[in-house]
Amino acid sequence: MTQIQNMEQNNDGNLSQVRHVVLVLSGKGGVGKSTITTELALALRHAGKKVGILDVDLCGPSIPRMLNVGRPDVHQCDSGWVPVYTDAQKTLALMSIGFLLEDPDEAVVWRGPKKNAMIAQFVSDVAWGELDVLLVDTPPGTSDEHLAVLENLKKHRVDGAVLVTTPQAVSTGDVRREITFCKKTGVRILGIIENMSGFVCPHCSECSNIFSKGGGEELAKLTGSPFLGSVPLDPLLSTSIEEGKDFIQSFPDSATFSAISSISQTLLNSLQTA
């Protein structure tokens, strides 16, 4: 943890050029929240936006692998930490605790105060520069980490949250509690995404409803929340995530591409009219 211990606190000016901040939440683990965060970021980048991802899932930092950026050294400038860029044009920036661990297999065994201090540094000390959208990938649930993110973002407007669920009732029940959390903390719900909504056959492209379908959309109706759309289980997407490839660029003719692109455009429209 040497790199973490040597970093110095900075100030909240690093968010001054960030136009929109969006939290990505889920009521439980395993619903594909980090996958959705990654694909939304790629879709927004392909739409011509400058995007950042702040990965505050301290115990499960998977986005560096999904974006195939490895474990580069994190450098400092006068304003703080320099994020890791995934492309030469610097249109997609990422900061994750995965970059700061000396051993990739090292477990982050921290109590609440140390986690909160790390999140405070992530929020204030990353020199993002000019961004159209900053996506904050959070851990599952409604824990200390979420409260720490909101507390440290008080000086900068949080546009709202995107909630990710799978169609099953066991998942939507947990996301219902996440909606209650947003209402209690004053976070605007930008919309619900139903992930793993059907399975796309890699041979004929037919979609079969393995896990049922429509649970996320029904939850949105019941709670008066916007429904952003559904993303199916797609082997091509799974392979792209595993190999750190850009699914949006590789499979522009797929139904999953259309779904993700539509969701990202709806999200952009919502942010612009906020």
Image (cartoon, grey):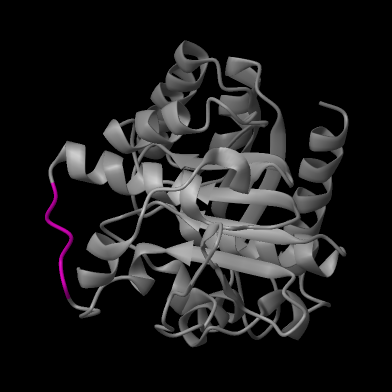
- Where is residue 41 shown, x and y percent of the image? 67, 61
- Please state the total of marks drawn on the protein image: 0
- Where is residue 62 shown, x and y percent of the image? 39, 68
Q: Is residue 156 left or right of residue 91?
A: left
Prevailing secondary structure of the magenta residues: loop
Q: Is residue 181 above or below residue 238?
A: above
Q: Is residue 103 left or right of residue 132?
A: left
Q: Is residue 196 left or right of residue 274?
A: left
| Residue 128 sits in quarter | bottom right
Question: Depth check: 127 or 257 in front?
Answer: 127
Measuring 32% from the left and 38% from the top, which residue is drawn there? 145
206 in magenta:
no
- Where is residue 38 shown, x and y percent of the image? 58, 64
- Where is residue 232 shown, x and y percent of the image? 61, 60
Measuring 81% from the left and 77% from the top, which residue is drawn there? 252
Seen as rendered, the residue at the extreme top is 184
Is residue 163 visible in the rendered image? The answer is: no
Give the residues in magenta.
106-110
| Residue 86 sits in quarter | bottom right
Question: Depth check: 249 or 208 in front?
Answer: 249
Q: Is residue 84 left or right of residue 190?
A: left
Q: Is residue 38 above or below residue 146?
A: below
